[in-house]
Amino acid sequence: MKKTYKIKVNGKAYKVEVESVEEVASASPAAPKIEKKAEPKVAIPTPNSGANDVLSPIQGSVIKVLVKVGDHVKKGQPLFVIEAMKLENEVPSPVEGEVVEILANKGQSVASKEILCRIK
């Protein structure tokens, strides 16, 4: 059912037609089903995890992996760059040691507190 109204905007008169929402919804084809995206996988801490795990400080996308397995890193050395809300955030090493496992790859989405790599 359409209704016609007369409205004034900045002193100028306009005629507008308005349809009821129920009528528009029933006249249009069925809305497509939207599939939910899978929740991001979060690394579950293992018994040997702890001080040597490098965790993502924020949720975002890994845009750079600056180390590889076997690299010796110093405390504070950048290991990853994570983009969140158009900002690039460096993830520094919390300890000095050798990178023994990398769990995040370039282009991967990561959750806050997700394990990015392990240092021994």
Image: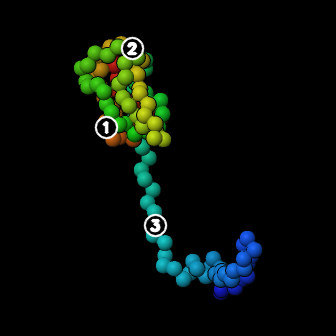
Vertical position of residue 42 compared to residue 55: above or below: below
Task: Indicate left or right for 43 with 17 as reference.
Answer: left
Q: Nearer the viewer, mark 1 or mark 3?
A: 1
Q: Which mark is residue 75?
A: 2
Residue 70 in percent (x, y) is at 24, 20
Vertical position of residue 39 compared to residue 100: above or below: below
| Residue at 43%, 60% in the rendered image | 35
Residue position marked by numbered label 1 in the rendering:
106
Residue position marked by numbered label 3 in the rendering:
33
Disc 3 crowd, CA 10 A, few/some/many (<14, 14-19, 20+): few
| Residue at 34%, 19% in the rendered image | 119
Tell me the amino acid under the disc marked 3: Lys
Disc 1 to disc 2: CB gap under 8 Å: no
Tell me the amino acid under the disc marked 1: Lys
Residue 61 in percent (x, y) is at 40, 39
Q: Under tag 3, what secondary structure?
A: loop
Q: Under tag 2, what secondary structure?
A: loop
Q: Is residue 102 visible?
A: yes
Toward the left, the furthest residue is: 70
Task: Tell me the quarter of the image containing the N terminus.
Answer: bottom right
| Residue at 48%, 33% in the rendered image | 58
| Residue at 68%, 83% in the rendered image | 15
**In which quarter of the view is residue 72 placed?**
top left
Residue 110 in percent (x, y) is at 41, 38
Disc 2 crowd, CA 10 A, few/some/many (<14, 14-19, 20+): few
Tell me the distance, in whole angstroms, between the alpha carbons under discs 3 and 2.
49 Å
Disc 1 crowd, CA 10 A, few/some/many (<14, 14-19, 20+): some
Tell me the amino acid under the disc marked 2: Lys
Front residue of this view, candidates 13 and 100: 13
